[in-house]
Image (cartoon, rainbow, N blue to C red):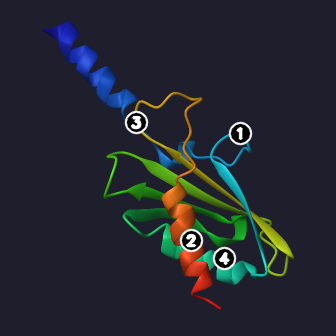
Amino acid sequence: MKLISIFLFGLLLAGCVSVDSLQSNGDFGDKYLVTGKNHEQIWRAATVAMSIDMNIVESHTPSGVIKSKVVNGTHGKVVGFFIQPTDASASRYTINIVSKKPLQSKFDSDGEPSVWKDFRQALEGMD
């Protein structure tokens, strides 16, 4: 019985994913290029996209990072939205969207295409 309890506790811990584990290191997620928009427009659209079916748990404009936990969908899934550069008047911005779910291998990464779609829709509405 004790062994089963330890196993179940270990499985529970392995199933937890933290937003702290989300990083924009270039190896994971999907990358996109945005031109013709300023940083404020991109930030507002990203905030809208990261709020759909998710709760934003970290939002830091100076570093260009938004991290959310999924509330409608895969339980325990987290998503990070990374904007670079953070210069207000850059001519182009790179967007890196990374998601992780419980029990995901370190090589299995999802760029969360629905967030990109929601972001583009919100950005187009700012014309």
Label 3 and label 2: CA atoms lie apart by 24 Å
Label 3 and label 1: CA atoms lie apart by 19 Å
Label 1 and label 2: CA atoms lie apart by 21 Å
Disc 1 secondary structure class: loop
Mark 4 vs mark 2: in front: 2
Q: Quarter of the image for the N terminus: give it.
A: top left
Label 4 and label 3: CA atoms lie apart by 29 Å
Label 4 and label 1: CA atoms lie apart by 22 Å
Identify the disc placed on residue 5.
Answer: none
Q: Where is mark 1, residue-wise?
A: 27
Q: Which circle's residue, 1 or 2, is located before the other in the chain?
A: 1
Mark 4 vs 1: CB contact within 8 A: no
Q: Where is mark 3, residue-wise?
A: 102
Q: Which circle's residue, 4 or 1, is located before the other in the chain?
A: 1
Mark 4 vs 3: CB contact within 8 A: no
Disc 4 secondary structure class: helix
What's the residue type where badge 2 is placed?
Phe
Q: Quarter of the image for the C terminus: give it.
A: bottom right
Residue 121 placement (x, y as % from top left): 55, 77
Mark 3 vs mark 2: in front: 2
Label 4 and label 2: CA atoms lie apart by 8 Å
